[in-house]
Amino acid sequence: MNKQHTHTHKVQLSAYNMEVKAAYFKVLKQTKQLLATIERHELRCTYLRKTKDNKGFITTVNELISPLLYLSLEWSVDNLTISYGFECFNNESEYTAITAKFVRLLYKLTSIEHTTLDIEECIDTEYVNTDCSALYEAIDDSNNKQHSFSLIAYKPTGKRKQLKAVA
């Protein structure tokens, strides 16, 4: 491989990783907005982890852990990947709509229709966390200094605001 081809490959890789990172932070922002619509404050509690963008075998760059949702931006060899998870419920749970919206949001914002480069392969499905509450409790119970606690402020959706105004 000549130097020109190697340089072009690195530039493309860098652009790819920048696009993955931008998509991740869009997903993260909208995930927090989604969590903000939940009335129960304990379900709006999150642990956040931010580290430097050091490449390594697998290094977490940014992570959100809540009792309902999990989202993580990680280095895997040379590429950034997005890992995710959601608490599994039966269809009768009011939170099924939240977890379903989260998954649709994740795939929508990383689709070729919403990005300048094709990053659809950045979603890591090798391990999808389906027990976010257990992960949240493990972080909560540990003396973990890598994560910081955050309570997302409650912001009712437009429908709830209208109902309260009528009442």
Image: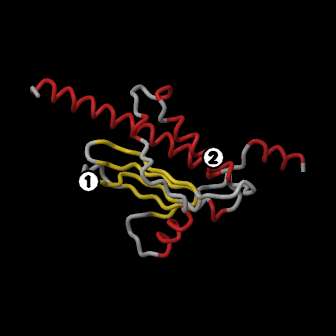
Residue where numbered disc 1 is placed: 57
The answer to whether the residue labelled 1 contacts the one labelled 2, judged by CB atoms less than 8 Å apart, is: no
Helix, strand or loop at mark 2: helix
Which residue is farthest front?
126
Q: CA distance from mark 1 to mark 2?
A: 31 Å
Q: How many marks?
A: 2
Mark 2, residue position = 100
Horizontal arrangement in the rendering, residue 35 relative to residue 10 (left or right): right
Report the residue at 40% width, 71% height from top. 144
Residue 80 percent coordinates (x, y): 34, 43
Q: Position of residue 87 (x, y in %)?
A: 59, 58
Q: Name which residue type carries label 1.
A: Phe
Instruction: Indicate the secondary structure of the residue bearing disc 1.
Output: loop
Judged left or right of residue 147, residue 85 is right
Where residue 118 appears, as percent x and y from the top left, is 40, 29
Q: Quadrant of residue 43?
A: bottom right
Could you classify mark 1 by the number of other residues whose Cα lies within 10 Å: few (under 14), some (14-19), or many (20 or more)?
few
Which disc number belongs to residue 144? none
**Residue at the location (45% across, 63% down)?**
148
The picture quadrant where one finds residue 86 is bottom right
**Sequence-first disc among 1 and 2:** 1
Residue drawn 51% across the image and 55% down it? 70
The residue furthest right is 167
